[in-house]
Image (cartoon, grey):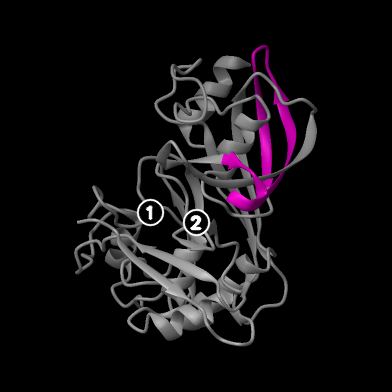
Amino acid sequence: MSDRIERLKYDGEQPIRLDKFLVAQLTEFSRARLQGLIEDGFVRVNENPAKKAGQSIESGAEIEVRVPPPVPSGLVAEDIPLDIIFENDDLMVVNKPAGMVVHPAAGHASGTLVNAALGHDPDMEGIGGEERPGLVHRLDKETSGLIVLAKNERAHIWLQDQFRLRTVNKIYLALVDGKPPTPTGRVEAYIGRDPSHRKKMAIVQPNKGRESISEYKTTQAFKAHTLLEFHPLTGRTHQIRLHCAFLGCPIVGDTIYGKKHPTLDVSRHFLHAAKLSIVLPDEKSPRTFTAELPDELKNILDELS
């Protein structure tokens, strides 16, 4: 099944928010669903990727919305063990293993984190999109570490606001080939779809993508590799992987954005979501959750030491 393409034109006299216009035109989709399409790069305004759901569009603006084919309906709750770091009535923080896909998609209709979450708590509301209940952020399949899932609509909105306002503090550990230009630093670049490879992202010109920002610091230096601590200030697809490659020190084992043949004996890329600080519903101060490096990554560091 191919993508559905909707081409629209705004003829109003006054500027309007992009998501508000789309909700009025595509009434079968929720605002959250349309905002998700904008966030994922499936909406273009005057042939350029939409920058954000709240961007203003003027009279005469031409909008293209590409809706990917849906995953077959009917999410199945599966009895898959989860490493739950924290859980209450509003949310749960999970230490996701490498190799687990976060939500169902083409080629991954089962065995995902969402299937496991529904198996753990069948009463989780179908929020954030029918096929993505509870999700407010994502991790790549081969990235391990912390991810938070909302268990009700109120918590979902609460968490979404923190991610949108960039008040969530996330720390990742990445082992890279070589070393960055400076021991500490900040990366600012625009990320968009790779024009040559639809499933890849790329560093692009400002008018072709969305702003991405990360800060990093060196935590351990080896002869030919460096362990970096990354603090992403935005949440673009493949952001840290692209930023490492942009710095000239791709992540070990990242055969998409780095070396085709890993320099160390790894079965996946060395990227781990190690720390997450977030304010829980009805609380005022952030709580910090941590997840240790999995054994296969610890062993790599032990061999380098």
Q: Position of residue 202 (x, y in %)?
A: 54, 39
Q: CA distance from mark 1 to mark 2?
A: 9 Å
Which comes sooner in the sequence, label 1 or label 2?
1
Residue span colored magenta: 203-231
Q: Is residue 13 above or below residue 257?
A: below
Q: Nearer the viewer, residue 260 or 65?
A: 65
Q: Position of residue 110 (x, y in %)?
A: 23, 54
Q: Position of residue 79 (x, y in %)?
A: 23, 58
| Residue named by callout 1 | 102
Q: Is residue 63 left or right of residue 129?
A: right
Say which amino acid is labelled 2: Ile
Please identify the dominant SS of the magenta region.
Answer: strand
Q: Nearer the viewer, residue 117 or 131?
A: 131
Q: Are marks 1 and 2 in contact (CB under 8 Å)?
A: yes
* Residue 149 visible: no
Say which amino acid is labelled 1: Val
| Residue named by callout 2 | 147
Q: Residue at x 24, y 61 (%)?
A: 71
